[in-house]
Structure formats: C-alpha cells, structure tokens
Amino acid sequence: MAIGLHQSDFKNPVVRWIDSRLPVFTMMQKEYGTFPTPRNFNYFWNFGALAMVNLLIMIATGVFLSMHYTAHTAYAFDSVERIMRDVNFGWLLRYVHMNGASMFFIVVYIHIWRGLWYGSYKAPREILWILGVVIFLLMMATAFMGYVLPWGQMSFWGATVITNLFSAIPVVGNDIVVWLWGGFSVDNPTLNRFFSLHYLLPFVIVGVVFLHVAALHITGSNNPLGIDPKGPQDTLPFHPYYTIKDSVGLIVYFIFFAFLVFFAPNYLGHPDNYIPANPLVTPAHIVPEWYFLPFYAILRAVPDKLGGVALMFGSIAILFILPWLDTSPVRSMRFRPVAKWFLVLWGINFCILTWVGAKPAEGHYVTIARWATTYYFLYFLVILPLLGRLERPLKLPESIALPVLRGGGPIPAGAAAKPMEKA
Amino acid sequence: MADAMAPHAAPHGEAGETRRDFLKLTTGAFAAVGVGAIAWPFISSMNPARDVLALASTEVDLSPIAVGQAVTVMWRGKPVFVRRRAEEEIKAAREVPLSQLRDPQTDQSRVIRDPWLVVVGVCTHLGCVPLGQKPTDARGDYGGWFCPCHGSHYDTSGRIRLGPAPANLAVPEYNFTSDTQIRIG
C-alpha cells in the first residue's frame, strides 16, 4: 500500500478506497463497533445516547421552525401562531421542539444524576465531567433564549427578569444589562440577538458534545460498580450489545415524548405565554420553565440581590469543582453506605427546590427554600469532603465479570486472580 | 440466552437463512418506515402553507382596459399579463400555420374570449419578465412580447416564435366571473 494511506480492513472496494484516504469507517468501527464497554451497564447508561438523539431532534425541528419564524417584536407572536395554524405540520414541529426542550432537561438531569450516583466525575473523568457541565450551561442559555422567541408574556417577562440578574453585578451591572438588551428595555434588538444566539448555540453544543464523547472514549465508560475493567472478560463490544440496549431505551423515550407531544403538549408550558408580550403589564405570578425552577428557588431564597444571583450561579459552578470536593476514591454509591443516603437526600432536596421554585415567594415557602438551598450547598462543600475521610466504604468486588457472571457461565481465567486497583 | 452470546448462530431455516436475518430485515423495515414517517412532516412543512394557498387566486376587473391596452397583475408572486387585443392582432395570431410554431398551439385554445389574452408573464427560457406591456416597450418581431434577457420573441398569442425559449407563455387557470371580471387561479 502506498505511503500515507491508511491500512483499511474493509472488504467493500468503495468503502476501502474512502477508508484508506479518510478512515472514518475505521474510526466508527473502533469507537462504536468494537469499542470495549463495561459489560454491567444498567439503563442509566442509556441517557447519554438519549441526550444525543434529543439534541439532533431539537436542531432538526429548530431549523425547520426557523424557516417560518419572524424575529421581530411586531411579527414574532403571529408568526408562531401561523406555524401552529397554517404551516403544514407546523403544530407538530413546534410541539416537538417545545416538549423536546423539556425532554432534553429530563434526560440530562437523569444523566447528571447517574454521574453523581456512580461517581462518574471522579478521576480520571474530571474533564469529561467538566465538559458535561459546560454543555448543561449552554443548554440553559439556549433554552432560555428559545423561550423568549414566541414573544408571549412569559417570554418577555422571563427575558426581563433573567437579564436583570446581571444588574446585581457591582459597578458595571447596569451597563452590562443595557449591552445585553441593545437598548433600555427588552425590545426588538434583544429579540433579534436572542434568535441569532439561539440558532448558534446548539451547534456550539454539538462541538462540546464531540469533545465530551472524545474524552469519554479515552477514559472509557464508568459502570455501576465504579471499578475499572481489568480485561476483555469485563467488557463487551459496543455493537451490538449497547446499540441494542440504547435502542430499547430510545423506544421508551419516544413513547414518553410522543405522549407529551400528542396528549399533553402544553402541560409543561405556561398559558400566559399565549398572551402577546406587553411591556406595560407584568403577569401576576411569573415562573420560569420547570427545568429552571430549582435554581430560581435558590435565587429567591436569598434576601439579597447580589447574594441570590451569586448563589444561583454558584449552584451550577460548584459542579465544576465537584471532582475535587468529593475526596473518596470509591466511585459508586453502592459501596458508600453513608454517602449514598446523603445523596438520596440531595436528590429529594433538588425536587423540593423544583417544587418550591414554582410557589409564590412568601411565608413557609421561603423558609423551605432556604433550608433546601442550605442543604444543596452543604452536601457539596461539607458532607462530601468530610465523608471521604470519615466513611468506611464497603468492600469492592474484585472485577466486573465476577458479580455479573455469578451463577452463570465460567469465570474467565485471570479475572479473579488480579488484585484490586482501588480499596 | 445462549444465542445472545453467539451472534453467528447456526441456521434455523433453509440454507443460509437464520432467525437473525429475519430480525434484521424486520428491524430494518420498521426503521425505514419510521424514518419516512418522521421525514414526511419536515418535508411537508416546506410546501405552501394554508395562508399562502388561501391567497392563491386573484380577481381582475377588466372594465377599465381599452382595446390594445394591457395590464399586469400579481398572481402567486408572479406577473400575469392581461391584454385586450385588437382585431388585427387576433387575426395575425390565427393566420399563422401551426407548422411554423415551435410549441404548436392554436390561438383559440389559448383564450376563453377572443380579445382577452391572459398569460403568465414569465419567459419560459430562464424566468425573466418579457417587455411589451407598455405601448413604449419593444414588442419583438411578432408584436407580442420581447424578453430582453436572452432575446425571445413572443407573438400576439404569447407563443414563442424566435429566440431560446422552449415553450409558449403559460396560460394560467382562470375563468370569467362576469363579463368584466376574471378570477385567476
């Protein structure tokens, strides 16, 4: 073979010709065909693939919606209604896009929960985790700006409240807000730039997802036991084993998604957003979309403008340093008898924040929000660092294959003989 | 299942046919139908929307148009030429033998009422709008229209006579709603 050509193993002459010059087939075969994947995945490991599919659905529906949308304060609301009433299948595209945003956050929240429960953020996957948090932030920005585009009452007042968060920054805050708006209130320039960025950011997400997956394919996947595969007996080729397992999850995901789109398309939305934006009247009770409620609750829990904003951003920023806050070398919560209960409580606490975020900021709700906010941070800043020292983890299994094949086929030689890598 | 551990299991049916082949083909067929069903709404959404279709017909009042005059109206985003022809123009159009035409059509087949010629004002070559609506316009060698882009000449029936265009100016679907009004589309 000529110098400089890739040595391709493919038989098909056309595939082979391309692959020798641009080894995409070899790469796909390596990364998604034979890629050695821990054999003990549970269904929590579907959610990365689901998030990827969801991102593609959002981009596809979004590109087609933008063909009919007009980014102008005088036309935006009507153009969305035109999509609903006049454009062929416009209602379907919009409901898929709308509920797709909710589905994306459901999927990503479960994906993050999987990471927290099985310690996927720990060495050597810190960069992988950090890239994930970056994707999460980009998603939040994209979702927020997308919600502004229909130019309903919630769009307008959501945009007003969220952009005003930046006015809490000392000295330059107000200038930053004027800069974000391109004027002295949320208006046409704001709508135009939000549309531009809402179209741009998903492709930035695609880029970061690529890095996220690239990093994953260096370290390999974590697994429910949180121990490293020690050899081929602990892994399976990605295809067909996990392509099939992901497909099963994908079907369940589509059923749930379709139920929302066809039977409850506005269940997760807010009726006020079907009232055209009116800069003179604020709705009596404004709430963000459900996926922002926990952070909104943290914002409102603090009786200080700057403090609330700082804690709200801090609640996500803290995820960046999580790999160093959790000092325990044991990844999976299965083997952390104390930490696991604190994490369960953290999960419940997160749900409480979501619930209280939708309630009016008064009376007992404020008290609940404050306790929940306190626990949110306490878990990361005090409990995890301390437990790493104080907790006595359970004994880790010697290999992945051992418990999986218990009572089943023979254990491959060498699987049990090697010593554990981590205590 | 033992099969799950051995993808290339022994054949179950006829030589070379396996249960796995059946599963693969079934899965593939479902996937193809699924992809088609998903692609359909996306493709369909790019077709004219209902509000566009609702504006797809245009009414034209003919009463102010004098003999020899022409008006241009907008129909589906394109110009439509409505021309009230003089007797000699009609006569010129009808005297031409069909053998001399590139796109043979009789004048009678292109009009509903003799004086009124209604054609889409888009040259069948590459889509320019031909000249000839105003009395001062060049009307080409045959007294109809002349396309300045690539030099196509149309006659008083809107038929191509000279130049690169392959076909006559299209006659849109229209009907007379009264003696002095037509509805195009």
Image: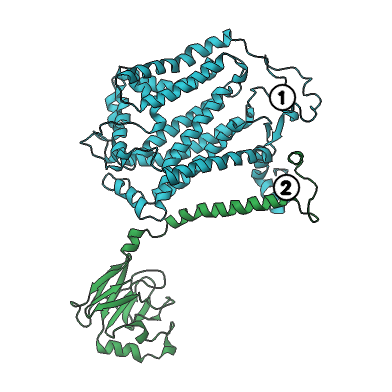
Q: Measured from the top left, where is residue A335 in percent x and y?
A: 63, 17
Vertical side of B55 occupied by B60: above or below: below
Residue under pointer 2:
A10
**Left or right: where does residue A276 sit relative to residue A267?**
left
Tell me what residue is drawn at x 33 percent, y 84 percent: B142
Instruction: Give the amino acid at mark 1.
Output: Pro
Residue under pointer 1:
A403
Q: Quick one: which residue is furthest to the left in this view? A: B64
Element type where label 1 sits in the image? helix
Tell me what residue is drawn at x 28 percent, y 73 percent: B183
Q: From where the camera sits, is residue A268 visible?
A: yes
Q: From where the camera sits, is residue B107 visible?
A: no
Q: Nearer the viewer, mark 1 or mark 2?
A: 1
Q: Quick one: which residue is furthest to the top in this view? A: A390
Given residues A170 and A119, the one toward you in this image is A119
Given residues A108 and A76, the one toward you in this image is A108
Element type where label 2 sits in the image? loop
Chain assignment, label 1: A
Tell me what residue is drawn at x 47 percent, y 47 percent: A60
Q: Measured from the top left, where is residue A163 in percent x and y?
A: 31, 30
Q: CA distance from mark 1 to mark 2?
A: 37 Å
- Circle nearer the N terminus (1, 2): 2
Chain assignment, label 2: A
Tell me what residue is drawn at x 33 percent, y 30 percent: A162
State which chain is coloured cyan. A
Vertical side of B155 occupied by A35: above or below: above
**Left or right: where does residue A280 sit relative to residue A408?**
left
What is the drawing colour of chain B?
Answer: green
Q: Pointer 1: residues within 10 angstroms few (<14), some, or many (20+)?
A: some
**Left or right: where does residue B50 sit relative to residue B179?**
right
Which numbered dot is residue A14? none
Quadrant housing residue A274: top left
